[in-house]
Amino acid sequence: CQAEDIWLYEVTGTAASVCGVTVAETPVNQRLFPTTSAGIAGQLSRDEIRGVTGQTTDAQGYVWWRLDDGTWVRGDVVIEQGDCSGVAIVAP
């Protein structure tokens, strides 16, 4: 048995059991704090998956996800990936 034309692919992103977020269309602003009045720290690009390390809910009832770099994105403008049910609630 001899193998030919073997292709290997590196799959990036988050594992199914780990919470992550992505956006489907336009880039989403990453904020320094979980509010739209906070400074913009970057943008989450289309199809980029970022790990989530915490969550909080603002005064208007929006869930904000804290990303692995410490920035925040609002939950209604991102798509959850993996299991986000156990993400810790954190203080901003």
Image (spheres, rainbow, N blue to C red):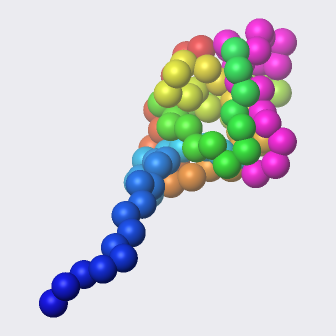
Q: Is residue 83 visible?
A: no
Side of 5 where 65 appears, left or right: right
Which percent across, then down, holds residue 8? 37, 64
Is 23 drawn above or below residue 68 in the view shown?
below
At 52% from the left and 22% from the top, the residue drawn is 69
Question: Which residue range is magenta in the image?
Answer: 24-40
Is 19 drawn above or below residue 11 in the view shown?
above
User: Considering depth in this image, is 17 or 40 the residue closer to the camera?
Assistant: 40
Say which quarter of the image contains residue 67. Answer: top right
Which percent across, then down, holds residue 29? 77, 26
Q: Report if residue 33 lies within the magenta region.
A: yes
Which percent across, then down, holds residue 76? 77, 42
Which percent across, then down, holds residue 45? 71, 38
Side of 55 where 57 appears, left or right: right
Q: Is residue 50 visible?
A: yes
Number of labelled discs?
0
Side of 9 where 42 appears, left or right: right
Is 4 drawn above or below residue 44 in the view shown?
below
At 41% from the left and 54% from the top, the residue drawn is 10
User: Considering depth in this image, is 6 or 25 the residue closer to the camera?
Assistant: 6
Residue positioned most to the top: 39
At 50% from the left and 37% from the top, the residue drawn is 51
Residue positioned most to the bottom: 1
Q: Report if residue 59 lies within the magenta region.
A: no
At 65% from the left and 24% from the top, the residue drawn is 72
User: Considering depth in this image, is 35 or 89 the residue closer to the camera?
Assistant: 35
> Quarter of the image containing the C terminus?
top right
Say which quarter of the image contains residue 4. Answer: bottom left
Helix, strand or loop: magenta stretch: loop
> Quarter of the image containing the N terminus?
bottom left
